[in-house]
Image (spheres, helix red, strand yellow):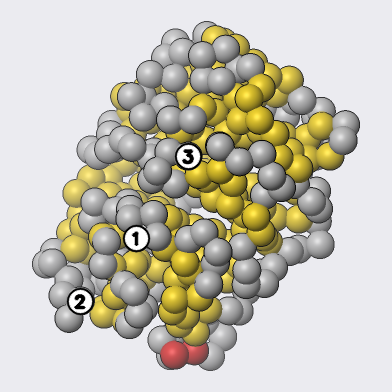
Amino acid sequence: MRAQLLARATLPSLWSLDRIPGAAAWLAHGVDGALVVLDDSLTAVREVRLPADWKGGHAVTPDLGHFVASAPDRVVVLDPEGREVWSHPHVPWEAEEAGSCAVTAAGVWAVVRTAEGDRCVLLDVADGALRAAWPLDPATVGSELLPHPDGVHVGLAASHADDAYRIFVLAADAQDKPVEVPPGDNRVLTDIHTSGRMMLTTPIEAGPLALVRFPDGAVIAARQGEQIFPDEDEVFDIYAGFLRRDIVLAASSGERHVLFSVPDLRPIAEIEYPEDAPREWLVVRSDGTWLTADSESGTVCTWRPEQVPATD
């Protein structure tokens, strides 16, 4: 199935690229420290300059009015001009480690390091006051927070020094220890369905693309790469997301992008791109559009299918 190009832009070399929950916009973090909000034409509509060592997972409020940045030693909220509104200090991350943050109706969520160990904290969006904290064990080296559509829960994808990856579910109205979602320690949480009833996971190295039930992680469907890709060494990459309520778009290690039906993960079609299209990164949004990007060149493209995929 052919991809229709909607927009193309060249940015500085990229550290990360993500969708902005609740907004028709994208967030690019350049290796030069620029944090840029892009509209669907890939035009910069907001930009702040962060120190180059701020390589955590950052966020933007749904109204695009404020940036939330995960710094090496604090979480900070910035206004559109880059002025600090408030900050929440924490024990510094070690080299090659980083925290993350997200914004929901409940407040600002962040993964931070404390003297007692790593924590996921919930901060008041107005002044940064600590509202809740959950212990994370073992210690993290990287993380990503994914807001749940209900505004109360978040999913947490955490990586650890032993090369393990774990998935946790937290709730703003529950002060208990985070619930670790099975199965296994080698999967990454990549998206949460708009219904809130399913989560999408991708493997680290070999393993299946999987749909799991929210919040307990029971497997709804799983698809092994060897069932899809012609090369036995080709496996699922970490990039995937819900393109629509009934469709998942997932990437392979060979930079193939394949559509799957929901909830059975039956393969529908492989995406066909122009020869010069970047395919290293894939960022999927549930309104039927997605980004591809090359991190070094900074080339970013927005796409949608040329025809509506059928899932029957």
Q: Earlier in the sequence, mark 1 or mark 2?
A: 1
Q: Are marks 3 and 2 in contact (CB under 8 Å)?
A: no
Whether residue 278 can be seen here: no
Question: What residue sits right under mark 3 in the picture?
Answer: 152
Q: Which mark is residue 242?
A: 1
The residue under the point 81% across, 28% down is 91
Type of the residue with mark 1: Phe
**Left or right relative to 275: residue 77:** right
Q: Which mark is residue 311?
A: 2
Question: Where's the C terminus, which quadrant?
Answer: bottom left
Judging from the image, what secondary structure is the residue with disc 2 in? Answer: loop
Whole-percent x and y of residue 234? 52, 82
Type of the residue with mark 3: Val
Whole-percent x and y of residue 124? 56, 20
Whole-percent x and y of residue 61? 41, 27
C-alpha gap between disc 1 and disc 3: 20 Å
Judging from the image, what secondary structure is the residue with disc 1 in? Answer: strand
The residue under the point 34% across, 67% down is 248
Q: Nearer the viewer, mark 1 or mark 3?
A: 3
Type of the residue with mark 2: Thr
Whole-percent x and y of residue 52? 64, 28
Mark 3 closeness class: few <14, some 14–19, many ≥20 residues within 10 Å:
some
Q: Is residue 193 above or below residue 95?
A: below
Please identify the quarter of the rendering in which residue 221 is found. Answer: bottom left
Q: Earlier in the sequence, mark 1 or mark 3?
A: 3
